[in-house]
Image (spheres, grey):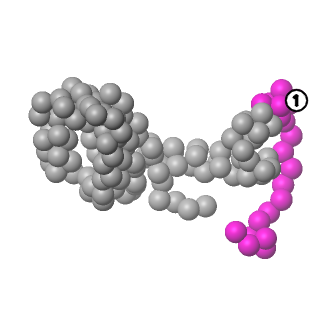
Amino acid sequence: MPASDTTRFSVSLPAGLLSELDRRMTRRGYDSRSELIRDLIREKLAEEHWQKDDEELLGVLTITYDHHQRGLAQKLIDLQHDRHVNILCTTHVHIEHDRCVEAIIIRGRAAGIERLSLEIGGLRGVRLAHLTRISRVEL
């Protein structure tokens, strides 16, 4: 972002909150409070976009599963084809003899993406399902 597009402003915080902000800044590897605060604001705005469900959004569903589970691979394929969301791509990696990780990039309305995530996460043999919610708003 060009410096001319940036506005400086002052924020007053209680000492305890500032200490927590600084701990979080260090823990997450930020160079400055400003960078952390910008990301926190972006996260909150993205969260609000997901609550509205009135626009097309992106999500990344990361799953780990037992690929030896009978019928699971076919159920995963069927669910991805039968929903009102657009699967942009999947990446499948074998991490152990019986365990795979897959990242599924999804475009659609929040409710549809959430529903697909829950359905896939609830399948027998899926050990972990985590949805990363992405807003299409770039600020």
Circle 1 crowding by C-alpha within 10 Å: few under 14, some 14–19, many from 20? few
Query: Quadrant location of the N terminus?
Result: bottom right
Query: Quadrant location of the C terminus?
Result: bottom right
On screen, residue 32 above or below 19: below
Identified at 18% across, 29% down, the residue is: 69
Between 34 and 101, the residue placed more toward the observer is 101
Q: Where, by quadrant of the figure, is residue 28 drawn? A: top right
On screen, residue 16 above or below 27: above
Give coordinates of residue 118: x percent, y percent: 30, 33
Name the residue carrying label 1.
15
Any magenta on residue 22? no
Q: Amino acid at mark 1?
A: Ala
On screen, residue 85 above or below 71: below
Q: Is residue 136 left or right of residue 16?
A: left
Q: Which residues are magenta?
A: 1-21
Q: Where, by quadrant of the figure, is residue 20 drawn? A: top right
Between 89 and 86, the residue placed more toward the observer is 89
Give coordinates of residue 104: x percent, y percent: 33, 49
Q: Is residue 119 visible?
A: no
Between 23 and 72, the residue placed more toward the observer is 72
